[in-house]
Image (tube, coloured by chain):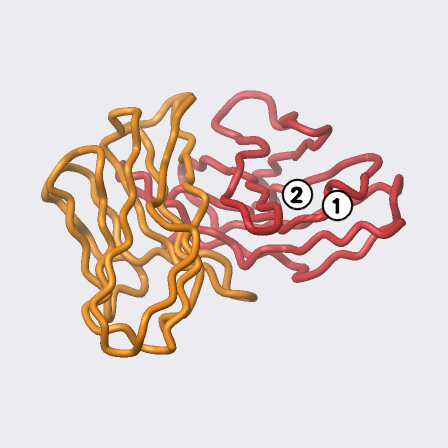
């Protein structure tokens, strides 16, 4: 069965510093990968997705992620964070089959400090 | 824009009550999902439905049931609410099939407190 591991539960970082949120997934023949963001008291919003093609995926709010098949990773990066990026971030992968069952990691809380 | 609407943002219920959480989507999606979100555990799938009247158990179905009588509506039912079901509940929908439209869309969530 597919699984997703987010390696850091909390990532504190100062404003304007770069950040990387790590995500590893269990391997599969075909993989669709996603990063979602959840701001306080809100639902999940899609940041970016990898379906096929270029391994570097650009998303909203200046975030990007790189799909690395050999390392089964899909780390999320931003070169310079803002206070407004403080939120919880979830990595997700579709399970096998065509039902669209999304499997989530445990989440990483990004805390941006002034 | 795709819209997934959950009927309540906040709910407080008593132990033993039967609780209904409602979710409606307006994009004719075949697949709908109920997740539970708890700190440190991420989102865990309770049930999902891939068509009207069709449902499958997710990872944590115990204590829950679902109903999908119409394509746009997916209800989560707590048959007899317990305090360990206090949590944030998120509904999602997605069209069937792969391709570039494989994104899932989420509602705003319902924070349920069982006292």
Q: Tell me whether marks 2 and 1 sit on the same chain.
A: yes
Q: In x, y percent, where is residue A84?
A: 75, 41
Q: Chain of mark 1?
A: A
Q: Residue B29: which quarter of the image?
A: top left
Determine whether the residue tagged by mark 2 lies in a helix, strand or loop. Answer: strand
Q: Residue at x 89, y 49 (%)?
A: A114
Q: Which residue is tagged 1?
A: A20
Tell me, by letter, which chain the rendering colours orange: B
Q: Residue A31: which quarter of the image?
A: top left
- The quarter in which the C terminus of chain B is drawn is bottom left
- The quarter in which the N terminus of chain B is drawn is top left
Q: Are marks 2 and 1 in contact (CB under 8 Å)?
A: yes
Tell me, by letter, which chain the rendering colours red: A
Q: Chain of mark 2?
A: A
Q: Residue at x 22, y 39 (%)?
A: B73
Residue situated in front as seen by the camera: B93 or B59: B93
Marks 2 and 1, how far apart at CA: 7 Å
Q: Which residue is tagged 2?
A: A75
Label 2 environment density (alpha carbons within 10 Å; few <14, some 14–19, many ≥20): some
Residue situated in front as seen by the camera: B92 or A30: B92
Q: Residue A85: which quarter of the image?
A: top right
| Mark positioned earlier in the residue sequence (2 or 1) | 1
Q: In x, y percent, where is residue B27?
A: 30, 24
């Amino acid at each position: 069965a597919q699984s997703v591991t987010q390696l850091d539960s909390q990532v504190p970082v100062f404003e304007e510093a770069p950040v990387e949120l790590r995500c590893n997934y269990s391997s599969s023949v075909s993989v669709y990968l996603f990063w979602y963001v959840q701001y306080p008291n809100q639902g999940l919003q899609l940041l970016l997705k990898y379906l096929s093609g270029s391994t570097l995926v650009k998303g909203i709010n200046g975030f990007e992620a790189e799909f690395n098949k050999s390392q089964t990773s899909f780390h999320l990066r931003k070169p310079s964070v803002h206070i407004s990026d403080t939120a919880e971030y979830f990595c997700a992968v579709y399970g096998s089959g065509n039902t669209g069952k999304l499997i989530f990691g445990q989440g990483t809380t990004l805390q941006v400090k002034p | 824009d795709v819209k997934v609407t959950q009927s309540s943002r906040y709910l407080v219920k008593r132990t033993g009550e039967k609780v209904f959480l409602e979710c409606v989507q307006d994009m004719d999606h075949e697949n709908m999902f109920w997740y539970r979100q708890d700190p440190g555990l991420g989102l865990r799938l309770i049930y999902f439905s891939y068509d009207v009247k069709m449902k499958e158990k997710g990872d944590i179905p115990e204590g829950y049931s679902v109903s999908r009588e119409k394509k746009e509506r997916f209800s989560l039912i707590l048959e007899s609410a317990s305090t360990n079901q206090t949590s944030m509940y998120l509904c999602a929908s997605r069209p069937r099939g792969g391709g570039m439209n494989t994104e899932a869309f989420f509602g705003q969530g319902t924070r349920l407190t069982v006292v």
